[in-house]
Image (cartoon, grey):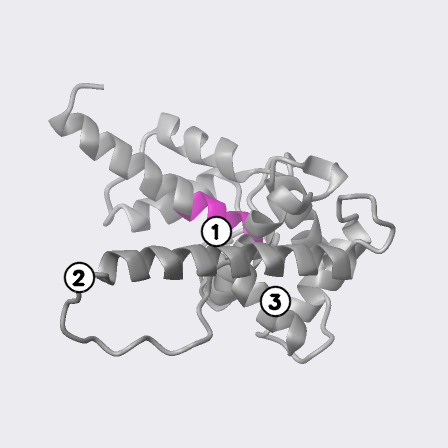
Amino acid sequence: AQVRSFVFMAVGVSVAGKRPRGAARPDDACVKRRQAWDEERRRRLALRDLMKLYDKDRSGRLSKRQVEALLTDAENGTPAGTPPTAEEIEFVMQSGDHGAEGPSLEELEYTVAQWLTYVQMRDTLDRDMKRFDISETGSLSKEELRNYLTELNDGTTVSDAEVSLVFEQADVLKNGKISRPELMLAISAWYTHLEESQSCCFFPC
């Protein structure tokens, strides 16, 4: 429970209730700045505490085994003590800027936030993987990814260039296929592409 409290605080998830709304006061802006400063300070302290708790060798980075321990303790979608799969650990290790070296204190927030997002999406990703993994390999090929993106695109077929763009960004394991964790990145890459494409309609790129 203490570890999960650190984890939520480290990524800025509030565990306290909201202050009731009241009449505007002249010092509201000052109070909000102070609250934001206090929240940022708590977040940084929580990240530091997480690093100290799992960086047993005091190397300044979390090894794969240490990351596995952190993710196991932070997991709230499976029975307590259930470790992530080898594929999930490799995904977390490879999807950050740190690579195989493991996350540093500065990179830990992204690592934790990404894992919590993945845990929340895991049931949806499982369902979608089963629907579009026609070859039943446990991952999506480029053509299977095209079918998935087509559904996200309201049935309009996506181009080869768009499939390649999303595939390249999502395939962080560099094994030529999209695994369940990587499917989360594929979704993000697709909607980012759509937003950028739509902005170009209004503002010349």
Mark 3 vs mark 1: in front: 3
Whether residue 180 is visible to the viewer of this picture, yes or no, is no
24 over 159 or under it: above or below: below
**Residue at the spot of label 3:** 6
Q: Which residue is mark 1?
A: 184
Amino acid type for the residue under numbered disc 2: Pro
User: Magenta span covers which residues?
Assistant: 179-187
The residue labelled by disc 2 is 26
* Main secondary structure of the magenta stretch: helix
What amino acid type should be assigned to the residue bearing mark 1?
A: Met
Q: Position of residue 197 (x, y in %)?
A: 24, 31
Q: Which residue shows up at 23% across the image and 19% down it?
A: 205
The residue positioned 55% from the left and 48% from the top of the image is 110
User: Hey, which quadrant is residue 65 in on the image?
Assistant: bottom right
Residue sitting at x 66%, y 55%: 48
Numbered disc 1: secondary structure: helix
For the residue labelled by badge 2, is the local secondary structure a helix, a strand or a loop?
A: loop
